[in-house]
Amino acid sequence: MKKALLILPLLVLLTHPPAAHTQSFGQFTTAAVASEGEGGFFLLAGEEAIRAGVMARFLVTGRSDIGFQIGYDRECGENSIGAGVDFKYYPISSSSDFPVDLAAGLSFGHFRSGSYNRNQLGLTIMASGILRAETNVPIEPYASLMLLTTYFVKRPSCGEERGQCWPCSEDDWDSDTDTVIRAGVNVSITHEYQVFTEISLNDTVLFGAGFNVIF
C-alpha cells in the first residue's frame, strides 16, 4: 500500500499533462536496476501516430544500467527512423528500507526524416514499486518525469512542410524544450518474460505495450 501511495502523485500528473514530445520512443523500464541483459520489442499507437522498434538494456554497475532503442516513428505527418540510448542511476543504498525504487536518468536520441533531423537530450526522474496480487504475480507500476530538449539539425524554413509539432518563430526554430510524463505497468509473467503496458500523453494520446526477455 505504501508503494502505491508514493507512486500515485506521479500518476495523477497524467490527468493534467503539459505539451510534450517523447524521449526516444518510450520508457519501457522501471526505476529498478536492470538485469545483466534483457531486450525485446515495443509498439505505441494513437491517432495518426505510431512508434515501433526493438530495445535492450544491460547492467553497468550494481546501481546503474544502460538502455538502447531503435525503431520507426510517425507523428505530425512525418516518418522518421531513430535510435536512442539512456543511462539510469539508482541512488538508494541496497540496505535501505525505502518502500519504492527511485532513479535518475540521462538520455540521448537521434531521428532522421525527409524534412528535418533532430537530436533529443533528456533528464529524467523515475519511480516504481512492486505490488503482489493473490496470484503472486509481480506487478510493478512505474512513472517518470522528464525535461526534454530537442535540437533540430536539418530543418526547412518556416512555412514549408515541417509538420505541426515543432516550434516556428520566423526562421529560427533551432531547439525546443518540453516536460514529458509517462506511466505504465510491468507484469512479470515468469522470471524471464515481462510484459509492459504504457501510456504517453502529448497532442495525441498514445497507448503501447512491450515484451521483454531477461537473458
Image (cartoon, rainbow, N blue to C red):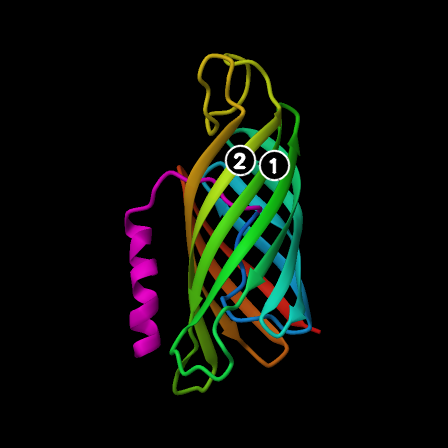
- Which residue is drawn at the image coordinates 51% and 24% (left, top)? 163
Q: Is residue 11 magenta?
A: yes
Vertical position of residue 85 compared to residue 28: above or below: above
List the residue tagged with mark 2. 150
Q: What residue type is disc 2 on?
A: Thr
Vertical position of residue 198 compared to residue 118: above or below: below
Compare residues 119 and 27 and report the one nearer the observer.
Answer: 119
Q: What residue type is disc 1 on?
A: Asn
Position of residue 175 measured from the top left corner of the image (x, y, whole percent):
51, 29
List the residue tagged with mark 1. 119
Position of residue 110 measured from the top left corner of the image (x, y, whole percent):
64, 39
Residue contact at pointers 1 and 2, CB within 8 angstroms? yes
User: In the image, 36: left or right of 16?
Assistant: right
Which circle's residue, 1 or 2, is located before the other in the chain?
Answer: 1
Give the magenta-colored segment's residue range: 1-24
Vertical position of residue 61 compared to residue 172: above or below: below
Q: Which quadrant of the figure has residue 68? A: bottom right
Placement of the C terminus among the 4 image quadrants = bottom right
Q: Is residue 83 magenta?
A: no
In the rendered structure, find residue 51 and report the number of the disc placed on it.
none
Question: Is label 1 in a helix, a strand or a loop?
Answer: strand
